[in-house]
Amino acid sequence: MFTLIDQDRTHDVAARVEGGRLLLSAEALRDALGWELHEGTLCNDAMCVPLPAGSRLGDGGVFDLAEVAATLGRPLALDVDAGAAFLGVSAGERAQTLGSLMAPDFTLPDLAGRSHTLSSFRGKKVFMVAWASW
Amino acid sequence: MWQALYEELRGRNFVVLAIALDKSAEDARPWIEKAAPTYPVLIDTQHAVADLYNIVNVPTALWIDERGRIVRPNDVVFGTDTFKHITQLESARPLAAVRAWARGETAGFTAEEARALQTLPTEQAQQARAEFGLAEWLARQGRAEAAERHFVRAGELAPHDFTIRRGSMPIRGIDPMGPQFREMIQAWAASGHSYYLPLPDTRG
């Protein structure tokens, strides 16, 4: 089994390693990451992304994870020896969100484990400060 | 650190929201318990907020207005002058600016000004964050050796990102105040870079 981390969700999937590449079946791609190939476009329930010209993604029912990430424009950290990979968020998506100046929302716990969501402070001015013990 | 500011301004429809980019709640706990804040202090072990806001060091502060818009992007703000001898940054001007904004005396930046002051991430910086994400997950699984490869790779890809380079030190068993940290910032300064990048208008 191989662990795919898609931001904060982890999925254990059946996968094959071949020459440093991680190959997924169509089922594994759909179940773990929510993407399916339809007539030359990669779709999830929110959007479709066309494959680049000449792409062989999905030929023979095989999906190279690095090619999936490249098609989606997302960074991929892959460690076939460790059996894990992390799909990050593209610079383009971050730039679009930050450039809109709408503060990206998030929910995190406090020390007591109680969740707080940024958008619940709507109506107040928020001085948000990131710090660390280091 | 921000308790006095919060108490002074809370009647102004103002809140402080602190986010600890620490490897565990336990790392942040002594600091939080000592400060006894009445504003929320959240724990972000996976650096989700660093990724969302392109935060590359601490402390980093942003102003978010009543409508949820960023009216002052990432800035370096210290709550006190405790570290002034090291940082060369005074807290007075940035804190005076926060007070003026909270009291409604100033409005923060216009959208155009705020965008001009934003630093957006590069593809390489986002690749670094993916490497950090993988490393952090591997470390949590107790797989220190595999994690180390990706912490190192992340730091190489984003040498400017100290939430990665310094923030990973406690996870890797490295003293974040020790010789490796000092070597790191000396090399960074020697190559002509600044460790802290405050916005120019209220630079302490």
Image (cartoon, grey):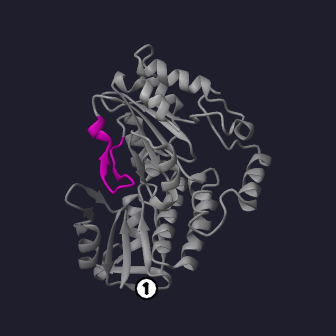
Q: Is residue A98 above or below residue A26?
A: above
Asked if residue A55 can be seen in this view, the reply is no
Number of marks? 1
Name the foreground residue: B9 vs B56.
B9
Q: Is residue A45 above or below residue B134?
A: above
Instruction: Return the x and y of residue B51 as percentages of the image width and height.
Output: 45, 51
In the picture, residue A83 is in which quadrant? bottom left
Name the foreground residue: B88 vs A29.
B88
Name the foreground residue: B160 vs B99.
B99
Q: Residue placed at 61% from the left, 52% from the top? A: B162
Q: Is residue A26 above or below residue A54?
A: below
Instruction: Return the x and y of residue A8 as percentages of the image width and height.
Output: 35, 62
The reply, left or right, for residue B3 in relation to residue A1 is: right
Q: Which residue is mark 1?
A: A17
Name the foreground residue: A94 vs B201.
B201
Q: Which residues are magenta?
A: A104-121
The reply, left or right, for residue B87 in relation to residue A32 is: right
Q: Residue placed at 42% from the left, 29% from the top? A: B7
In the picture, residue A74 is in which quadrant? bottom left
> Looking at the picture, which amino acid does disc 1 mark?
Val
Instruction: Return the x and y of residue B166 as percentages of the image width and height.
Output: 62, 57
Quadrant including the C terminus of chain B? top right
Q: Is residue B57 above or below residue B71?
A: below
Identify the subunit bearing mark 1: A
Farthest residue, direction top: B105
